[in-house]
Image (cartoon, grey):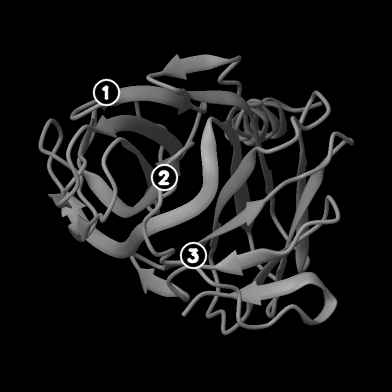
């Protein structure tokens, strides 16, 4: 094998994200039970599988990224109904969205992302425990180029319930290796490439803008999902309006 081919293969292997794990990380009454992530370089579907069976009463939050003009990014699997929270956003050559599902079962779970156009793409999902299975508020945006060490922020959200868990998903849509640091909360998961998820407890409801920082100056997407605690009682921000073939969409 010639030296150039060896180096090429090494670069390809190094660029594949490692399996994510949050391993029961507790934050207040909430727990990041487990995580999964995956990347593929072609095709219209990609999956990630949780390593353990789901916990009854948990929720799944998931985000995806594709390097093609996408008009459809749909999540399925695990006998759950996934609801697209904010629609598809784009920027920095990437198309991305985020979704949510309430879980009542205890079986194995493989989440599938199906896109409309074959592309390099990735998926990143968390299983969260301790919620009443209600999304209080959510937002997603292309944050643009953010200088190393500066806060990467989604659009501010306004919650209606005290004690929410605010999850921030961050994706380096440039596709470069980067190290993330928690800003306003606790870093639940950082994969070896592209992705991070942070959690923070919002003691009193109202406006909140979570933030994470990165080691490099790149283009980022940033999303926020507020999950109500057990016993919370605000009006849900996510009401699936379509459940055909297990596909939902939020108002």
Give the SS element for disc 3.
strand
In the rendered view, tell whether residue 244 sits above or below residue 206. Answer: below
In the rendered view, tell whether residue 138 sits above or below residue 16. Answer: below
Looking at marks 1 and 3 on the same chain, the residue that comes earlier in the sequence is marked by 3
Of the two numbered discs 2 and 3 in the rendering, the one whose residue sits closer to the viewer: 2
Crowd class of label 2 (few under 14; some 14 to 19; many from 20; radius 10 Å): many
Q: How far apart are marks 1 and 3 (CA)?
A: 22 Å
Q: Residue at x 66, y 51 (%)?
A: 102
Q: Which residue is drawn at 45% across and 55% down?
A: 135
Q: Which mark is residue 181?
A: 1
Q: Label 3: which residue?
A: 97
Looking at marks 2 and 1 on the same chain, the residue that comes earlier in the sequence is marked by 1
Crowd class of label 1 (few under 14; some 14 to 19; many from 20; radius 10 Å): some
Specify whether 49 is left or right of 164: right
Q: Distance between the residues labelled 2 and 3?
A: 21 Å
Q: How far apart are marks 2 and 1 (CA)?
A: 25 Å
Specify whether 146 is left or right of 226: left
In the rendered view, tell whether residue 208 sits above or below residue 92. Answer: above
Q: Looking at the picture, how far across and down is residue 38, in whole percent?
A: 68, 41
The answer to whether the residue labelled 2 contacts the one labelled 1, judged by CB atoms less than 8 Å apart, is no
Crowd class of label 3 (few under 14; some 14 to 19; many from 20; radius 10 Å): many
Q: Which mark is residue 228?
A: 2
Residue positioned most to the right: 107
Q: Which mark is residue 141?
A: none
Give the SS element for disc 1.
strand
The answer to which quarter of the image holds residue 39 is top right
Q: Residue at x 58, y 30 (%)?
A: 129
């Amino acid at each position: 094998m010639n030296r150039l081919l060896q180096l090429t293969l090494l670069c390809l292997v190094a660029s594949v994200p490692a399996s994510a794990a949050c391993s029961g990380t507790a934050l207040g009454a909430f727990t990041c039970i487990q995580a999964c992530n995956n990347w593929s370089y072609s095709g219209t579907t990609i999956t990630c599988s949780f390593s353990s069976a789901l916990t009854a009463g948990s929720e799944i939050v998931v985000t995806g990224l594709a390097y093609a003009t996408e008009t459809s990014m749909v999540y399925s699997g695990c006998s759950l109904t996934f609801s697209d929270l904010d629609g598809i956003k784009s920027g920095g050559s990437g198309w991305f969205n985020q979704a949510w599902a309430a879980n009542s079962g205890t079986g194995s779970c493989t989440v599938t992302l199906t896109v409309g156009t074959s592309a390099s793409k990735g998926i990143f999902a968390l299983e969260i425990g301790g919620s009443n299975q209600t999304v209080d508020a959510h937002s997603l945006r292309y944050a643009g180029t953010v200088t190393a060490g500066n806060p990467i922020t989604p659009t501010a959200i306004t919650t209606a319930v005290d004690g929410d868990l605010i999850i921030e998903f961050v994706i380096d849509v440039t596709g470069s290796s980067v190290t993330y640091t928690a800003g306003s909360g606790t870093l639940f998961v950082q994969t070896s490439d592209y992705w991070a998820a942070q959690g923070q407890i919002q003691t009193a409801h109202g406006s909140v803008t979570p933030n994470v920082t990165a080691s490099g100056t790149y283009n980022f997407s940033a999303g926020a999902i507020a999950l109500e605690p057990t016993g919370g009682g605000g009006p849900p921000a996510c009401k699936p309006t379509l459940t055909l073939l297990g596909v939902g969409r939020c108002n």
